[in-house]
Image (cartoon, helix red, strand yellow):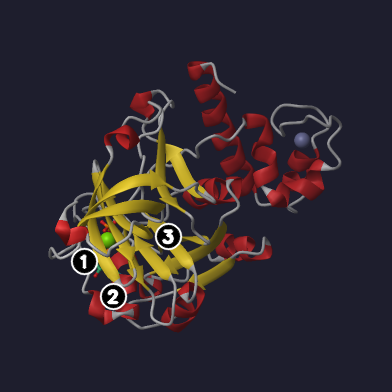
């Protein structure tokens, strides 16, 4: 037996950040640099991410006195939930990319402008969260850049669905106290496009983090992918928050086209009046959802977000031959 492991029993810990083949595990107040047992990296081909931030793992110490202490991950404990997307269109929709595991909520961040909100992005992330029973919080950052023409109606609609909606500004300090309160004692993932200010928000709440902040490219108005991997940070007063690299497109993993309706709760009341119980609210006659949109009871953009995602999910099903 290696004498450096003497008296240090195998333990379980929380994965703070993961790379291919290794990860950092927080256990009993220390951060362990761990390799993965080979068999863990040979998982099912359709899973790109055997270990992700938020995973609980069982590991054996290798050198407990090293700085940092080192170990080997023996087992990833079953995930209570996860937020996943299809890895890329190129993979043909066959590969699952897990963004994070075992979380309480996804905090979807968009900015008022620079970059402007991306149509359908919030709707897609909320579907991915609901799919595995994860909560959702919406943050509209860079409120200091808002002009009267920037319509807040869309955001207030999400509030009627029960989501917490915050307007924040790192420049004016608006909404930062509320954001800190929402993160407290919970495990959260900050997700959004590059440049919306995810890392800036975390720095504003906890300056000790000193995360790297990027700029916006003048030519495209887009961010520069300053944060390059998902990483968990402790929240003052308890909880963990993951900063993550900017994402653009988002296709939720493992959502059946026929089940998609269930993840749009605001369509449900109108759907009760559809002529057909199996109505997909597309071309069917007597569709209650289309009638509700025409009557101004349901925003057209929500129906459109649903239809765009439905089309993508059907395309994927046809391509992969899966449900
Ligand atoms: N005006 C204004 N600018 C902000 C605000 N928050 C962040 N920014 C700026 O937006 C740019 C991008 O900020 P980051 O925090 O790096 O954005 P990010 O979402 O972490 O980007 P990635 O790490 O690339 O995904 C920086 O130039 C910030 O100074 C805000 O509330 N108002
Ligand atoms: Mg960042
Ligand atoms: Zn219908």
Q: Secondary structure at mark 2?
A: helix
Residue at position x 57%, y 25% from top? Answer: 314
Q: Quadrant of ligand 3?
A: top right
Q: Are marks 3 and 1 in contact (CB under 8 Å)?
A: no
Residue 75 x, y percent position in the rendering: 39, 45
Quarter of the rendering containing residue 136: bottom right
The response on whether ligand 1 sits within 8 Å of label 2 is yes
For marks 2 and 3, the one nearer the N-term is 3
Residue at position x 21%, y 74% from top? Answer: 210
Q: Are marks 1 and 2 in contact (CB under 8 Å)?
A: yes
Q: Does residue 321 sit above or below 27 in this rendering? A: above
Residue at position x 35%, y 79% from top? Answer: 205
Q: What residue would you read off at disc 1?
A: 213
Q: Which mark is residue 203?
A: 2
Residue 120 x, y percent position in the rendering: 50, 46
Residue at position x 41%, y 56% from top? Answer: 54
Q: Nearer the viewer, residue 313 or 24?
A: 24
Q: In the image, which is nearer the foreground, mark 1 or mark 2? A: 2
Res 43 visible: yes
Q: Are marks 2 and 3 in contact (CB under 8 Å)?
A: no
Q: Nearer the viewer, residue 214 or 181?
A: 181
Q: What residue would you read off at disc 3?
A: 189
Instruction: Give the distance between the C-alpha atoms of the residues marked 1 and 2, in whole angstroms.
Output: 9 Å
Residue 93 x, y percent position in the rendering: 43, 27
């Amino acid at each position: 037996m290696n004498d450096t492991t003497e008296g240090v029993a195998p333990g379980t810990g929380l994965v703070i950040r993961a790379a291919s083949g290794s990860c950092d595990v927080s256990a009993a107040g220390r951060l362990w640099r761990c390799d993965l047992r080979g068999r863990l990296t040979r998982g099912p081909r359709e899973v790109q991410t055997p270990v992700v931030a938020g995973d609980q793992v069982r590991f054996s110490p290798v050198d407990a006195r090293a700085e940092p202490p080192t170990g080997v991950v023996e087992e990833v404990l079953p995930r209570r939930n996860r937020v996943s997307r299809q890895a890329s269109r190129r993979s043909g929709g066959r590969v699952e990319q897990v963004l994070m595991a075992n979380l309480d909520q996804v905090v979807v961040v968009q900015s008022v402008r620079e970059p402007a909100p991306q149509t359908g992005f919030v709707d897609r992330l909320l579907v991915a969260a609901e799919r595995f029973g994860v909560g959702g919080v919406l943050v509209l950052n860079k409120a200091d850049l808002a002009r009267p023409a920037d319509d807040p109606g869309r955001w207030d609609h999400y509030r009627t669905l029960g989501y917490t909606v915050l307007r924040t500004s790192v420049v004016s300090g608006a909404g930062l106290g509320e954001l800190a309160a929402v993160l407290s004692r919970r495990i959260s993932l900050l997700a959004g496009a590059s440049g919306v200010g995810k890392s800036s928000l975390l720095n504003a709440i906890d300056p000790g983090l000193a995360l790297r902040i990027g700029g916006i490219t003048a030519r495209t108005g887009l961010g520069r992918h300053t944060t390059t991997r998902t990483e968990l940070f402790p929240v003052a007063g308890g909880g963990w928050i993951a900063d993550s690299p900017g994402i653009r497109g988002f296709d939720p993993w493992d959502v059946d086209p026929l089940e998609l309706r269930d993840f749009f709760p605001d369509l449900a009341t109108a759907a009760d009046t559809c002529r057909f119980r199996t109505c997909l609210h597309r071309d069917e006659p007597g569709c209650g959802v289309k009638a509700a949109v025409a009557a101004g009871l349901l925003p057209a953009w929500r129906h459109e977000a649903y239809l765009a995602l439905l089309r993508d999910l059907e395309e994927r099903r046809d391509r992969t031959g899966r449900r």
